[in-house]
Image (cartoon, rainbow, N blue to C red):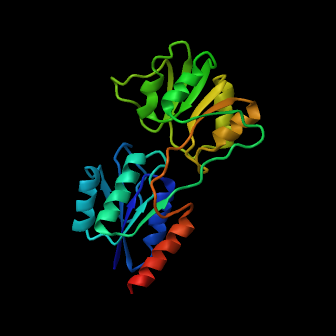
Amino acid sequence: MMRVLILGGTGDAAELAARLATIESVEIITSLAGRTREPLLPLGDLRVGGFGGVAGLVSYLEVMQIDLLIDATHPFATQISWNAVDAATKVRVPHLMLIRPPWEKVNGDRWIEVDSVAAAATVLQNQAQRVFLTVGRQELAAFAHLKDIWFLMRMIDPPAPDALVPPGMLLCDRGPFTLQNEREILIQHNIDTIVSKNSGGDATYAKIIAARELDVKVVMVNRPPIPPGNYVTNVDDALAWVFQKINYSI
């Protein structure tokens, strides 16, 4: 039996867990950070919560006798990704990153690319009036000082009651979102700018298409650097990597 730990929280992680769960010789454990109140639960065993840094993850890998570690977290979940590289190296567990490709700017896009959420907030000053903010509830405080801008803030869970939030309206919803839905939001709320992280994938790309069609600016937060190591860009290639490791272990 090959025991695989998936660091999850993405649709790709859930798909990978579901497909690996059909293999008799593989046992799947998916770890979720626990930041979403009602996460979509993957197939297989589940653990929720942080590990306690590199040392905690090392201990978990050893105690649970993990054979393979796959990091399929969100492209902006940088800390756990770097911790995973360090921990896997220390215990000599084969490690793979599943990183979906970022969105690429195409003809008609009006992107302003920045390297941080703080930089995105700076860009908005004197350049936007009504903003569709889609960077998640943990990033709202970076925009709270922009009192002259109205924000439509979309997230899965609402912020804490005492959280700093910019002026505007909260919209709690979970993707995937349709193109028609995103068009209606931009038109109904008279949005002139979208702020988004370049998370890639299909689940939230419709807002980028809608912005292109309606000539709406997009302040796009570029991804942070990824750790060194082996990585693939899709679930099929991640499965192929697992199959290769299973064959090597026989």
Q: Nearer the viewer, residue 115 or 180?
A: 115
Spot the residue most to the right.
Answer: 107
The residue lying at 36 percent from left, 25 percent from top is 163
Q: Residue at x 43, y 52 (%)?
A: 9
Whether residue 171 is visible to the viewer of this picture, yes or no, is: no
Q: Please give left or right for residue 149 compared with residue 90 in the image.
A: right
How many numbered badges does the structure rendering display? 0
**Horizontal and vertical percent for residue 6?**
39, 62
Placement of 14 over or under 27, stated as above or below: above
Q: Nearer the viewer, residue 54 or 29?
A: 54
Near-viewer residue (232 or 235): 232
Q: Quadrant of the N terminus?
A: bottom left
- Whether residue 224 appears in this view of the structure is yes
Split into 4 quadrants, where in the image is the C terminus? bottom left
With 141 as the anchor, is 169 left or right in this view?
right
Residue 159: x %, y % from top left: 39, 30
Point out residue 71 in the picture as x, y percentages from the top left corner: 42, 59
Q: Quadrant of residue 214?
A: top right
Report which quarter residue 193 is drawn in. Answer: top right
Q: Is residue 113 above or below residue 147?
A: below
Give the residue at x 35% y 49%: 33
Q: Residue furthest top?
A: 148
Toward the bottom, the furthest residue is 250
Which quarter of the figure has residue 61? bottom left
Counting from the top left corner in percent of width and height, residue 200 is at 58, 48
Image position of 186 (left or right of 163): right
Q: Relative to the observer, which residue lies in front, 225 or 136?
A: 225
**Residue at image point 42% right, 83% down:** 248
